Amino acid sequence: MEHDTKCLLSELRAKSPESLGSRMFELQSRSQLVQQKTAMRLCVQVDLNADNDPMSGTDPIELRHHKSDEYIAISCPWYVPGHDTVSGRYRFTPEQPPGVIMPPDDVLNRILNFKKCNSDYLNTPFWVDKICINQEAGDEKELAVHSMDLVYQYSGRKVVTDGKERFIGCSLGLLFLEIRTIAQLTMLRKLLDSKFAENVDNESKLLISVEEAISVLDLIEFILSDNWWHRAWIFQEEFLASRHMLLLLPCTLDRTGLFETNEEGIDLFGQTAGEIEVRPLNFRTEVTVFCLALCRNADETVRNRCDQILKQARRYTFLYRSKYATGPDSMIKAMSPAIFEDISVRGITVPSDTLAIAANCCRYVTRLNSQDLNLLKASLSIAILTLFVLNGEILRHDISPNYILGQTVFKCLRIAKLTIQPPVPAGELIFIKMCRLPAVTITPEGIMVRGVLSRLDKKIKVKVSLSDRELYWKTNDATTTNSLNDAEMRLLRALIAYLKTMREGGDALHTKLKEFLDAQAAERAAGRSAQYWSLPHISVMMAKAICRAIAEGRVLWLSRLHVPRKWTPWLGIFIPDDPFDISGVVSFAFTAREVENELKDRGAKLARRNAWVTSLEVRLPASERIMPKRWMNGLNFFNNKEHIRSLLMPWPKWLQ
């Protein structure tokens, strides 16, 4: 495959007489691969006892393969200079299976040391790619590689035993640089405990002087110098393991009495002998807050250092919500372009692996076969664009072609992805990640999409009592997104009452909204709420956005199924961008959602559980063609079987 991700899109376009869109069509037609995965976990088990101390003993230690749903997933570079000895002390019984590459002794020593020091994991098997994936079997290896996201995502799970919740399994990241001084150790503890900076109302504040902060910056850069932070596959492992990932940093210092301890008398760096334990999610959070706070007070040299740090250890959520950015590259508006960018700055032995890594992190269902693409000597940049579009990412049509063609593919994804305004101020990046076109087919002219096209043709304003409005603002809770409270239900009942008084077309919408509200009330009465990131959850979030619009006195926009020269009832309620638009231009809504059958047909059951949805205001430049204008939050009751139709969304001009 041609590794051309540093080329500008204008350079890519100049290489062929065909448009970029046509080349994407050609590429996907020759290499598209519907995702397949395996839930099998072939782990490694070892019997530990006092006679085979992994750190100081010399006796052989026998390993055996063992299938298990509970395991420790190991994350470390394949090659670590100075730690690459394979002495033969560790061996499989009765013999080494084919395709196994034994990890260095230091890696296995530290895994077993962690198990011995943490009784909850003493008998838990572990998973290491070198010895758990057959490195010689082509098809088997390909399937296992595309399933690595499941290994790390499900490495830690919550289970309920005898009415008690507990987590089983984890992911373990191995760093090899050593914390050598008490000063470094104390500074790291203070960083993780938010002693140097804090986040208040999405604004980062520095709690120490800039001079003191420079020493903290030195420590962060020292930790990030470990190769663990610079490998693309490891980025995937940490991203998917998330809060279940634990880092081990070598440290032989005596910590007795230095730090606060938990109820069991163990300090917050854990109890693993010769190591300190750090949650990378916590580390990323505090590093992001610290760098954002420092940049507001420091000179250009320090800001540049912070920019480099945030390329390796940034927390997307804080950068999305932050009121201050260190520079244009630190702005996060969506997760998938950020994931591609973070992969691009990390080391990767086989560039085409970028496709599998990005697909795993973005939870993409449709894959491209990198083996086919390598044989075709295809452009990696074109392949990335194709993967992005095939999985429903929505492109903007309002960008200057000259501007976007002057970017590399990774910058292009950030610029070209349609801006999404989440309906509620919670879980925004996850919601944006789900805002995709559920069913996409690439054609030479553009993409074929399936959904409901409705006409936006009536704006209404619902009057509510002062007491209802005050109750809403008094009880509004942005953190509760999967159920409606009493105040929200009262506002929706006011909307229902308004629809009931309308002379034409309000009956169907009034009835559907009442059924929706009755179902929500029944769920609440039963003590239930919508499963997070399911279609019912999204409907509740959209309903909350409508409630907020009513409480703010905003206008709502009603839509009806678009059937030329035929009257249809209103079935959609949307929140317009400009409630006072008097241009007279007719606008339309395109909505779509992925149904259960599509999930099964596309082999996505093991890949993800989150639904995909689309809710766009669109232009209708010609019959059966739509062009996206903007994301538009709203609630609709169209029949996604009877009302659905196929429409062409032409390529943006820069792809034509």
Image (cartoon, rainbow, N blue to C red):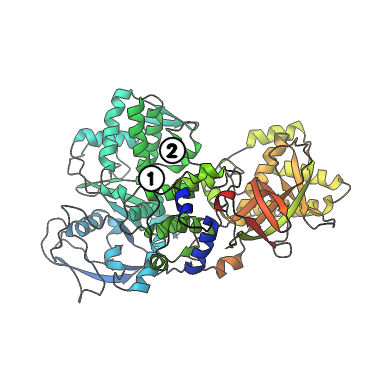
Is 277 left or right of 637, judged from the image as shown?
left
85 in relation to 211, above or below: below
Residue 147, percent across and down? 41, 65
Label 2: few (<14), some or many (≥20) within 10 Å? Answer: some
Residue 223, percent across and down? 27, 41
Is 489 left or right of 286, judged from the image as shown?
right
Looking at the image, is mark 1 or mark 2 nearer the viewer? 2
- Find disc 1 in the rendering and name its residue: 281
- For this orientation, the residue located farthest to the front is 17
- For this orientation, the residue located farthest to the right is 503
Do the residues under discs 1 and 2 have CB atoms within 8 angstroms?
Answer: no
The residue under the point 21% across, 45% down is 177
Residue 496, percent across and down? 79, 46
Q: Mark 2 or mark 1, which is nearer the start of the sequence?
A: 1
498 in relation to 390, above or below: above
Amino acid, disc 2? Ser
Amino acid, disc 1? Leu
**Residue 264 visible to the viewer:** yes
Q: Secondary structure under badge 1?
A: helix
Residue 1, percent across and down? 38, 61
Q: Between 2 and 101, which is closer to the camera in this rendering?
A: 2
The residue under the point 47% across, 55% down is 362
Is 305 left or right of 519, judged from the image as shown?
left
Q: Secondary structure under badge 2?
A: helix
Say which mark, if any, is on residue 330: 2
The residue under the point 51% across, 44% down is 404
- For this orientation, the residue located farthest to the bottom is 94
The residue under the point 35% across, 43% down is 312
